[in-house]
Amino acid sequence: MASPYALAQPLLGELLVRDCGVGADAIERALTKQATDGGLLGECLIALKLADEDQIAYALATQGEMPYAKDLPKADDVPGDLIDKLPINFAKAHTALPIGRDAAGRVQVAIADPTALHVVDDIAVMLGAPVDPVIAAPGKILDAINKLYARLRGGAELESGPKKDEGEEEFGDAEELVDILDLSDEAPIIRWVNSLLFQAVKERASDIHVEPGEKDVVVRYRIDGVLRHAKHAPRKFLPSIIARVKIMAGLNIAEKRLPQDGRIRRKIAGKEVDMRVATAPTATGERITIRLLDRSSILLGLADVGMAEDMLVTMRDIIRRPHGILLVTGPTGSGKTTTLYACLTEINAPDVNILTVEDPVEYQLEGISQTQVNAKIDLTFATGLRSFLRHDPDVIMVGEIRDRETAEIAITASLTGHFVFSTVHTNDAAGGITRLVDMGIEPFLVASSVVGLMAQRLVRRPCKECAKPVRPQERVVRQLGLDPEKFFAGGYVFPAVKGERELPRGTFLEPVGCPACLDVGYRGRTGIYELLMLDEHVRKLTLEKSDAGVIRQAGINAGMIALRADGARKVVKGMTTAEEVIMATADSGS
């Protein structure tokens, strides 16, 4: 007799194991979490990082016998008339979006929940057309919604002039943020500032500079480390623009003679963005600098910041040691904080007590206690670090070692069973050792506490859409430290690194420029690194107070990959260009 369950739908867990490569033990762990915390099985798997959204969406589509869309069309490929009658709030609330129309006039709608057929029916009524649902990952649907509506509502400019916005409610607070793309009834000056922030997020800017001139207000964005002119406004609007930003940041709008610092938190195109605001009086009026921090972006792991496999193995061994100091060196803006956060993310676990003291706290890390330096109340790196030692930490991160007192406490902490992460401002890894000695730290303390030093720089990535492979000049190949004969013969084989591109033999990538990269030729950045381990030889040189050049050469003799050499590996793997590496390592002694 046939089983009465023969035609029953397969369970989601069974499909994930059978078709998506998810382990049976992962399903068991997720079911345990579901029994304790509630929620859907897919949500539990994602929360535990045992499966991703695409795997869940594929399994749901299979279970519901519905089409699955791994990739959604680009915003420019979706007909605008399909969303004219569909409010963005509805699309986001139901994670649903029309993505195309077939020859018969039927509209394809991407949804995340195969049981939400009532949403499909509602969309059919709104559009006045028959609808066919397809299943897609919710993150991809929301990203498509933001990009599509952003395209249709791009940058408002100042209209008839500024209006007073006294008594107006802020368009978002710490409890529930309202996306500025959803707002359409604000005063012109507010719309202009909103468009300023939206455009900066859209173009991936890290900083916004609002600078007063004699006749106008100039706005520049820093994108991938390079400043670019963005927009301008008549000079008469400067007081209104400054006042609006100050109100958003909770600053004193009447104080124009002293610098002020504040923070803004807003939702922009679906992303929660933190902004650090700094004002300063200048000869031509107040200027404002806004640093953008994307709260919704997933913090990078060590593999995501551009470390090759050989360096990853060593770094993961270092950061899991019970005690010692790891120093990250480099100039301002070289990505040191990002690397430290990547290290903390790797080791963050319920059984590890991690404390940080930073200036300022840029990203809030779940499960980690973070303290911000405050000079007004004498909360310095040293006082914060001294206090931490009474809180039973396993790992301590100090934003920067600036003075002897901080260095001494960090070394004491490392020698008493704690692992310490920190940064120093030097051009190369070996310079970090001499900097500590110059601060007055005894060489034997440096040699016995420091485990390793990592120097780094950020270099721009060639745009994936337009960069083209070219045969470089022999002079450029030699500048990178490569042998031209071996390079052109394809004789170099380097360790794998996430994000590498396969190039024809004997070629480098050359930037071109297209709309995707704003005609710059570059889009995004990656890191280049040198990791100096304190082996017996380097420790001996430290005790002898040898200069940084001698220590650095000893590291290279022991197998250290220098900054320019690591950059050369990234050039060969299509992750950056020779010009970027040569420029970034000009001061590193490479």
Image: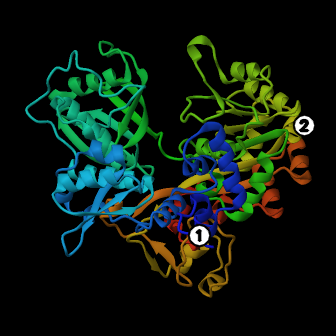
**What residue is disc 2 on?**
444
- Give residue 438's position: percent from left, percent from top: 76, 34
Q: Residue at x 70, y 37 (%)?
A: 422
The answer to which of marks 2 and 1 sits earlier in the sequence is 1
Image quarter (top left, top right, bottom left or bottom right) of the C terminus: bottom right
Could you give the CA–CA distance between mark 2 and mark 1, rounded to whole angstroms? 57 Å
- Tell which residue pokes out farthest to the bottom in this image: 489
Name the quadrant containing residue 287. Answer: top left
Badge 1: residue crowd in 10 Å (few <14, some 14–19, many ≥20): few
Kindly tell me whether residue 235 is visible in this rendering: no
- Give residue 224's position: percent from left, percent from top: 44, 52
Kindly tell me whether residue 495 is visible in this rendering: yes
Q: Which one is nearer the viewer's eye here, 292 or 522?
A: 292
- Tell which residue pokes out farthest to the left in this image: 160
**What residue is disc 1 on?**
19
Name the quadrant containing residue 87. Answer: top left
Q: Which one is nearer the viewer's eye here, 345 or 270?
A: 270
Q: Secondary structure at mark 1?
A: helix
Kind of residue at badge 2: Phe
Q: Nearer the viewer, mark 2 or mark 1?
A: 1
Q: Residue at x 67, y 79 (%)?
A: 492
Instruction: Please say if 173 is above or below 20.
Output: above
Instruction: Please say if 541 is above or below 130.
Output: above
Q: Which one is nearer the viewer's eye here, 483 or 121?
A: 121
Q: Which mark is residue 382?
A: none
In the visual, does 90 lie left or right of 407? left
Kind of residue at badge 1: Asp
